[in-house]
Each structure stands twice: as C-alpha cells, then as structure tokens.
C-alpha cells in the first residue's frame, strides 16, 4: 500500500548497507524539503510528544491527502520527509489503513532511533491518522 516514493526510499536503504549512510540519507531528504512557512508554525500544527519542535500541516484536495512539515532537528525533518513519501498522494480514506510501523520497520528505523525519537515518530503518525480520519468522517 506504500507510495512509489516510499518504495524508492526502501530500495535506496537496501543499497546503503551502513546505518550511518542511511542516517545521512534521511537527513539529506529532510534538507531537500522546503521549509514550512513560519505562519503555519502555530499551536494547531505543532505535534506534542516530540523531543524537538515539530509542525505538520495537512492538506486534502479532491479526497487526496498530503502534508508539509518542519522541525528544528535535522533528523526529524528527514523523518517527516520519509512520512511524506509514505502518505502523500494517498486517498484520505486510505491513510488510516496504512500500517506505518510495519512500513517503517522495512527501513530498520526502530532499531536505530532513540526512544524519544521513536515516541516522536509515533506522535507524528498519530497526528496524520487523526487528521485523515476526521476528514474522512466529514
């Protein structure tokens, strides 16, 4: 069910055998993202439960889910980029059905993130799922 962009990340991770290279890859993905407009960095878009500052701004057009985001931590920006690859372009009704922990496990992220980062990643996934579920209910 994962998006093509996420499958590309999985393929790249398979190619990169060293975890430090994978970590750099995730950070580079975050650096490549456009920064979130400061006007969107408000309490309503802030994700609680993250060790760093994290904002997610969802957008739903014609039933298709996407989001932008930002963080003050480079690795978290990279994780946001990975989540965007997983979720963006999905039908809003399909977003809650995506098994993000299982998809991310394909990258081995759980084994290489600190407990705080893992908690933050879960908080981001929950926010994404909540927004999509609310939209799907109308």
Image (cartoon, grey):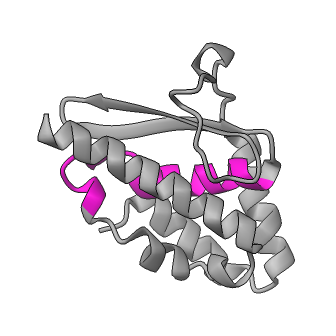
Quadrant where the N terminus is found in the figure: bottom left
Spot occupied by residue 92 in the image (x, y as percentages of width and height): 23, 45
Spot occupied by residue 31 in the image (x, y as percentages of width and height): 76, 43
Residue plotted at (63% across, 58% down): 120
Classify 36 as above or below 53.
Answer: above
Q: Is residue 114 visible?
A: yes
Q: Is residue 29 visible?
A: no
Spot occupied by residue 42 in the image (x, y as percentages of width and height): 60, 22
Picture quarter containing residue 71?
top right
Residue plotted at (48% across, 63% down): 6
Residue plotted at (28% across, 58% down): 96
Quadrant where the C terminus is found in the figure: top left
Picture quarter containing residue 69?
top right
Dominant secondary structure of the residues highlighted in magenta in the image? helix
* Most distant residue in the top direction: 39
Residue plotted at (50% across, 49% down): 84
Classify 63 as above or below 114.
Answer: above
Side of 77 relative to 106 (left or right): right
Classify 63 as above or below 17.
Answer: above
Picture quarter containing residue 4?
bottom left
Classify 16 as above or below 25.
Answer: below
Stretch of the chain drawn in magenta: 75-96
């Amino acid at each position: 069910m994962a998006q093509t962009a996420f499958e590309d990340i999985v393929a790249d991770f398979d190619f990169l055998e060293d975890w430090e290279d994978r970590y750099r890859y995730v950070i580079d993905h975050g650096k490549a993202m456009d920064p979130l407009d400061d006007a969107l960095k408000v309490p309503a878009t802030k994700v609680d439960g993250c060790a760093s500052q994290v904002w997610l701004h969802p957008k739903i057009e014609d039933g298709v889910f996407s989001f932008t985001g930002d963080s003050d931590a480079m690795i978290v920006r990279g994780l946001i980029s990975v989540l965007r690859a997983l979720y963006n372009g999905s039908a809003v009704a399909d977003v809650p059905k995506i098994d993000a922990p299982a998809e991310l496990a394909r990258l081995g992220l759980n084994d290489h993130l600190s407990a705080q980062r893992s908690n933050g990643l879960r908080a981001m996934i929950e926010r994404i799922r909540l927004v999509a579920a609310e939209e799907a209910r109308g």
